[in-house]
Amino acid sequence: MKYESYTYLYPPRPDRAIPVEQLGFFEKRGWVGQMKKNGTCTVLFVTPEKKVITKTRHNDDHKMWKQNESRALEIFENLPGDNWYVFVVETLHSKTSMIKDTLYIFDILVNDGELLVGSTFTERMDTLKEIFNVVDEDNVVSLSN
């Protein structure tokens, strides 16, 4: 399905948290998950012209983050293709004085104009790795040039 103009997309959210003591049970059955970083959930839209629009998970403008002053958005200026992208990120700046102007990208909802709703979490993680040239060795993940 195509995504061709701005429409707010609500980020997928789990129905409930799994108790830590049950994580091994689900992992043995092939389930995957990701760490919550305690940031502010942000839906980040990238236009075909590579302009960035950010909203909270409630479709409100951010009050604590000045995106026009942020260097964290530079990575989105060089995305491949000529269509829309939508990412779900955590903005790691408002809850601590030690981390500022940092985005933790943890999901992708639209890839170069293609709506990814219905794809698996693992497929979307693979898409993120491909887009950002992520190297994943021995459980250490980093961006490559």
Image (spheres, grey):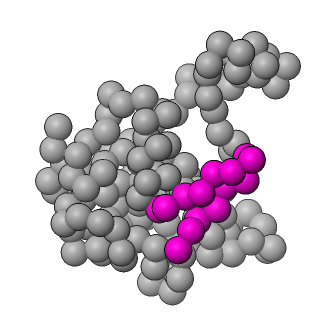
> Farthest front residue?
137
Coordinates of residue 61 in the picture (x, y in percent)? 43, 64
Residue 138 magenta-drawn? yes
Tell me where residue 30 sits by quadrant.
top right
Which contiguous range is marked in magenta? Answer: 132-145
Coordinates of residue 97 in the picture (x, y in percent)? 79, 74
Task: Identify which residue is drawn at 25% across, 56% down.
Answer: 112
In the displayed structure image, the side of residue 52 where residue 38 appears, left or right = right
For the image, the number of numbered tags is 0
Q: Is residue 74 above or below residue 123?
A: below
Residue 125 magenta-drawn? no
Q: Is residue 93 above or below residue 8?
A: below
Task: Identify which residue is drawn at 46% across, 73% down.
Answer: 75
Tell me where residue 36 sits by quadrant.
top right
> Farthest right residue?
21
Most foreground residue, 96 or 46: 46
Most foreground residue, 79 or 101: 79
Q: Is residue 125 above or below residue 30?
A: below
Residue 55 visible here:
no
Coordinates of residue 37 in the picture (x, y in percent)? 70, 51
Task: Identify which residue is drawn at 78% across, 67% down.
Answer: 96
